[in-house]
């Protein structure tokens, strides 16, 4: 505690904000953890996967998509770091790029769903389709929420709201976006690769 | 509305012994429960199974020990509150001396070792030798195998019939009517077609959930003939309370006669096209 | 002090009382809503008890109003809704808001010396999310097919369209999800506030036990409520989107979802949940026993570590709810060992309470009586849990009324009494007025006596084999002789309901016309009483206090000699001491 007490007031404020987000993300991780638990339960009890007569999941497009979302994360990270160093001008550019990649991710994800849907995989088909759609849709909802946050940050950054003094606000929002990205990587490995 | 605290305290003096008396009465009731008096009043239901006495004994012993602990706890609270009341000078003690920590840990530890230890050892032995010991039960050539299917709100029973195979023409299929021979291991596999039920034989001291898509297994041996209730213990919808079946324990001869006759009747009633009637499954070995 | 600036008090009515970010106002909002739902859930309990005493007979007073179609009698489908909603409402909309929402919000900042929560706005959202969930659960009652009726555990497939069509169950499920969000938001706030906003000198081992209890509860909330959220979400998807997470095709062979997976999710949350509800109660009682026994809490650190131990273990014992689901024997054994192991810290905590009141100078104030009552019912309830944690005895007792009696004693009765203990204790702090002790004592004796008899009656009925959740238990021949005990238990329950009347009178009378309180009516040393006024000003502390000692410095003879009183506050220095300076330098 002693070292914390000596921090600058702004740093203490930053620490509190980050701590709040870390706790929140821990909670979120438990929610996704529960979903993965269901998936693991289903997979370990299934003898054949995918079940006979149902299409296998594609790998190529989701792999591209994983890279797209990772890029989106990286863009936001670069922009935030620039802001922390005092470079306020580049922030809107990187946030826009991040937003763009995020949107591309959703578009490609919709294409994955559409292809599978057309080949006869619907939620009511059974547990195989249920876990696939359930997990990916719930993740996509988080991506969508993240995009709204990014849009707000973009608009505010154009107005010049953010400075290196309040960069924590962008950073905390960024933590959520990176979290969504990390969850996707787990999801990609679990659903598509394993 | 105003009563001085001293007066109020005096008025309650009479209430405290009354409450202590109440606690003692409660404990006495608890202690008397430790000895089952079958079928009457507050007691465990009649134990009709060969091994139910193991569970009854464990419940009884634990109740007796916990009754003692309960009395000690109640007495402690009352004595502390009355004897060490406002007039008593509080002892300044953080309870951090080695001795007091030792006492606190000792009390917690000894309760754990005695009560929990007894429960754990006996429970594990009973499960090993009886409740989970399906090999022993199925090894007996006379043992009766029954498939049970729960659905809203009734129990279906299926016996393999003379050919010893399930889901064939000669199966005995009964609705809410299970008959078994006395002194014979009865092995039961339970499943469900709609929601989760729980197959409960209170008089045989056994119970297992009926889960859709999953086969659960229990076995028991009846030690007396008679009629007993079969219940559903898990909430399964509107008429959960009516999901009741009848267990009839017959003598071995009567059972053999009944099985033979009923198999013949079932065979005549067999309808190949009635898919829903063929809910049976291949016997699952564990 | 830059972290805790003094904000100007809002002046508009809406900002001050409705969409307030002041933790004290939010605490009151939770309290009012919680008490309202306590009455609601209690009324549902009375209906259940009526049904068990007189199955199918027309309900006096309430029947003609609510069950007009049947001449005042409860029908089987209505009955399933009643017990389902009784469980859900009591747990999520009565105990949770009162113990965690109200006391958490009120006491954490006051007891650790903070001017507000770390995230005041999040705190406001937490209450309003809770409010929305309350609306959802009430909407559930308006459904044509009845409110949620799959039991509070909402086990699928019964809770899917297979077993409970209609939007009653859907709204109940969504209500659970939204109230979960509220709990998580509150939990984040509590965790961060305690870590970051403790006053100078307020080390971890100087925190009152109340704060420890609430903090550990917050951790459990944040970690395990999302698991329930996932479960509720997947069931909702099964209901609305046609997925098959927990629905299987048929008896055997057809491969669909797995209903047992939901039970795992539910109890991974559900078992910590009982500790979520009881940890704040343990904390409050731990403090109150010490305050009114005028003696330090016995082995404070032991109690803290016991609570931490229970918190850690709570997540890994959940399997004992599932012994009869066909669980693998080895897994069952592991859960049994862990379950029995959790009794060690629990008993340690209990023994510490008993030692706290021993050789004390017990002031039998209303909060103290409730604390003692809580110790009594919790002890009784805890002892009855042993038979349920053991696999072989649980075979017989599982899903009987014995389980109902057990968890009502531990979880419901204990947290109920602890809630009122806290309410009477902090009432002067919240409203600046005192409650009437005579009415309070009447309320206490009525509550504790009838709580004990009611739930003992349930234990006895369950011991004799009566199942839970039966519309008419006497359908079964082997329990027809239990009619009497069921009636007596019901009479006792009705008396318990009536015993709450003194509280209602006392509460409303005291809020508006009670005697103005002294600053520290109980002579206790914690910051909430010694460092801020009753009721506190908007920013709680004009000067954030510096803490120099633990929360239970009572009965010290040296203090008595030097200061002439039997206690010394957490901020007070003995003559010649210079602890504050040292604390500030730290």
Image: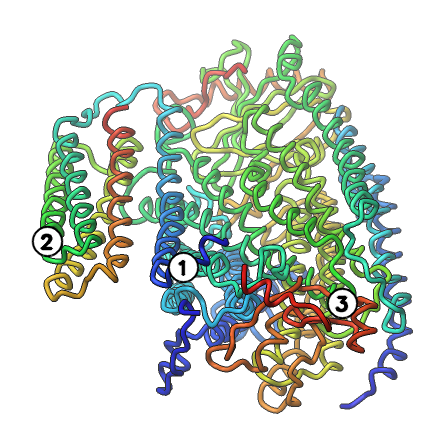
Neighbour tally class for label 2: few under 14, some 14-19, many 20 plus, Cα within 10 Å: some
Task: Report the front residue among B264 and C252.
Answer: C252
Say which chain tag 3 marks.
C
Disc 2, SS = loop
Q: Residue at x 47, y 19 (%)?
A: B268
Could you give the CA–CA distance between mark 1 and mark 3, rounded to whole angstroms?
36 Å
Q: Quadrant of the N terminus of chain C?
A: bottom left
- C142 relative to C310 in the view: left or right: left
| Labels 2 and 1 share a subunit | no
Say which chain tag 1 marks.
C
Mark 2 or 1: in front is 2
| Labels 3 and 2 share a subunit | no
Residue C355 sits in which quadrant?
bottom right
Task: Report the front residue among C328 and C80.
Answer: C328
Task: Report the front residue among C281 and C530.
Answer: C530
Could you give the CA–CA distance between mark 3 and mark 2, rounded to whole angstroms?
61 Å
Chain-order first, disc 1 or disc 3:
1
Picture coordinates of residue C181, whole percent (x, y):
39, 57
Could you give the CA–CA distance between mark 2 and mark 1, rounded to whole angstroms?
33 Å
Neighbour tally class for label 1: few under 14, some 14-19, many 20 plus, Cα within 10 Å: many
Residue A90 is tagged as 2
In the rendered image, the vertical position of residue B233 relative to residue C545, given as above or below: above
Residue C554 is tagged as 3
Q: Which residue is mark 1?
A: C185
Picture coordinates of residue C413, whole percent (x, y):
66, 60
| Labels 1 and 3 share a subunit | yes
Please say whether residue C198 is visible from this viewpoint: yes
- B143 relative to C543 in the view: left or right: right
Neighbour tally class for label 3: few under 14, some 14-19, many 20 plus, Cα within 10 Å: many
Residue C533 sits in which quadrant?
bottom right
Q: How many marks?
A: 3
């Amino acid at each position: 505690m002693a070292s914390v007490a000596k921090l600058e007031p702004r740093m203490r404020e930053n620490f509190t904000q980050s701590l709040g987000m870390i706790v929140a993300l821990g909670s979120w991780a438990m929610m996704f953890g529960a979903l993965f638990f269901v998936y693991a339960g289903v997979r370990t009890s299934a003898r054949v996967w995918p079940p006979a007569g149902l299409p296998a999941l594609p790998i190529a497009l989701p792999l591209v998509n994983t890279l797209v979302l990772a890029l989106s994360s990286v863009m936001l990270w670069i922009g935030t770091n620039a802001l922390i160093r005092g470079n306020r001008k580049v922030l809107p550019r990187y946030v826009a790029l991040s937003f763009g990649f995020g949107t591309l991710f959703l578009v490609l994800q919709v294409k994955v769903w559409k292809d599978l849907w057309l080949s006869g995989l619907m939620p009511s088909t059974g547990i195989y389709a249920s876990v696939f759609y359930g997990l990916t849709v719930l993740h996509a909802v988080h991506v969508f929420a993240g995009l709204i946050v990014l849009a707000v940050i973009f608009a505010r950054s154009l107005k010049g709201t953010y400075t290196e003094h309040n960069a924590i606000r962008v950073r905390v929002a960024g933590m959520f976006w990176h979290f969504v990205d990390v969850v996707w990587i787990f999801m990609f490995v679990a659903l598509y690769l394993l | 509305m105003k009563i001085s605290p001293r007066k109020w305290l005096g008025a309650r003096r009479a209430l405290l012994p009354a409450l202590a008396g109440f606690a003692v009465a409660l404990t006495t009731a608890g202690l008397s429960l430790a000895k089952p008096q079958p079928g009457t009043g507050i007691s465990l239901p009649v134990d009709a199974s060969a091994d139910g006495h193991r569970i009854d004994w464990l419940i009884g012993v634990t109740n007796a020990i916990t009754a003692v602990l309960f009395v000690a706890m109640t007495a402690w609270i009352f004595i502390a509150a009355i004897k060490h009341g406002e007039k008593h000078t509080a002892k300044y003690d953080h309870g951090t001396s080695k001795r007091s920590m030792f006492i606190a840990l000792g009390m917690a530890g000894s309760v754990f070792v005695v009560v929990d230890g007894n429960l754990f050892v006996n429970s594990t032995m009973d499960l090993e030798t009886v409740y989970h010991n399906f090999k022993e039960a199925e090894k007996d050539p006379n043992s009766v195998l029954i498939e049970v299917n729960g659905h809203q709100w009734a129990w279906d029973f299926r016996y393999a019939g003379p050919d010893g195979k399930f889901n064939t023409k000669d199966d005995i299929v009964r609705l809410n009517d299970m008959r078994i021979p006395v002194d014979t291991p009865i092995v039961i596999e339970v499943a469900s077609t709609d929601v989760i039920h729980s197959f409960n034989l209170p008089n045989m001291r056994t119970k297992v959930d009926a889960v859709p898509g999953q086969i659960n297994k229990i076995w028991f041996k009846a030690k007396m003939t008679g009629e007993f209730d079969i219940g559903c213990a898990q909430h399964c919808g509107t008429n959960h309370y009516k999901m009741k079946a009848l267990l009839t324990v017959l003598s071995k001869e009567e059972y053999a006669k009944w099985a033979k006759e009923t198999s013949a009747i079932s065979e005549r009633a067999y309808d190949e096209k009635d898919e829903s009637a063929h809910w049976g499954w291949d016997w699952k070995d564990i | 002090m830059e972290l805790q600036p003094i904000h100007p008090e809002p002046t508009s009515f809406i900002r001050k009382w409705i969409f307030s970010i002041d933790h004290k106002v939010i605490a009151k909002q939770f309290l009012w809503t919680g008490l309202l739902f306590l009455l609601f859930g209690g009324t549902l309990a009375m209906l259940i008890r009526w049904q068990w005493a007189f199955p199918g007979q027309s309900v006096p007073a309430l029947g003609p109003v609510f069950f007009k179609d049947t001449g005042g009698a409860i029908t089987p489908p209505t009955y399933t809704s009643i017990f389902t909603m009784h469980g859900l409402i009591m747990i999520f909309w009565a105990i949770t808001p009162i113990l965690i929402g109200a006391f958490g919000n009120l006491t954490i900042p006051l007891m650790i010396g903070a001017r507000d929560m770390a995230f005041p706005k999040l705190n406001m959202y937490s209450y309003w999310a809770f409010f929305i969930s309350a609306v959802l659960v009430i909407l559930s009652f308006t459904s044509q097919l009845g409110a949620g009726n799959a039991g509070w555990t909402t086990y699928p497939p019964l809770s899917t369209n297979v077993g409970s069509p209609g939007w009653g169950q859907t709204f109940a499920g969504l209500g659970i999800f939204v109230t979960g969000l509220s709990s998580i938001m509150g939990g984040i706030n509590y965790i961060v506030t305690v870590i970051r906003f403790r006053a100078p000198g307020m080390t971890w081992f100087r925190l009152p036990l109340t704060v420890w209890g609430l903090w550990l509860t917050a951790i459990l909330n944040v970690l395990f409520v999302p698991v329930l959220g996932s479960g509720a979400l997947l069931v909702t998807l099964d209901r609305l989107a046609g997925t098959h997470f927990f629905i299987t095709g048929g008896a055997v062979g057809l491969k669909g979802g797995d209903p047992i997976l939901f039970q795992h999710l539910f109890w991974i949350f559900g078992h910590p949940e009982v500790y979520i509800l009881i940890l704040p109660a343990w904390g409050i009682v731990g403090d109150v026993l010490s305050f009114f026994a005028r003696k330090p809490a016995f082995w404070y650190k032991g109690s803290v570590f016991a609570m931490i131990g229970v918190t850690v273990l709570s997540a890994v014992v959940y399997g004992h709810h599932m012994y009869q689901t066909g669980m693998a024997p080895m897994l069952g054994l592991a859960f049994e060992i862990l379950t029995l192991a959790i009794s060690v810290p629990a008993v340690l905590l209990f023994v510490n309470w008993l030692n706290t009141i021993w050789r004390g100078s017990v002031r039998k104030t209303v909060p103290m009586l409730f604390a003692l009552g809580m110790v009594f019912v919790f002890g009784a309830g805890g002892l009855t849990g042993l038979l349920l944690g053991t696999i072989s005895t649980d075979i017989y007792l599982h899903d009987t009324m014995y389980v109902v009696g057990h968890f009502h004693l531990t979880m419901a009765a204990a947290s109920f009494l602890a809630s009122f203990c806290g309410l009477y204790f902090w009432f002067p702090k919240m409203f600046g007025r005192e409650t009437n002790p005579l009415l309070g004592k009447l309320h206490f004796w009525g509550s504790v006596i009838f709580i004990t008899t009611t739930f003992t009656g349930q234990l006895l009925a369950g011991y004799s084999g009566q199942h839970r959740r039966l519309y008419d238990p006497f359908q079964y021949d082997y329990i027809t002789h239990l009619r009497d005990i069921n009636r007596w238990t019901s009479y006792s329950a009705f008396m318990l309901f009536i015993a709450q009347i003194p509280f209602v009178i006392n509460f409303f009378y005291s809020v508006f016309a009670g005697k103005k309180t002294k600053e520290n009516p109980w002579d206790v040393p914690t910051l909430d009483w010694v460092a801020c006024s009753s009721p506190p000003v908007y920013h709680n502390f004009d000067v954030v206090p510096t803490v120099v000692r633990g929360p239970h410095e009572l009965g010290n003879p040296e203090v008595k000699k030097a200061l002439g009183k039997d206690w010394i506050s957490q901020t007070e220095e003995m003559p010649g001491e210079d602890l504050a300076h040292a604390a500030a330098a730290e």
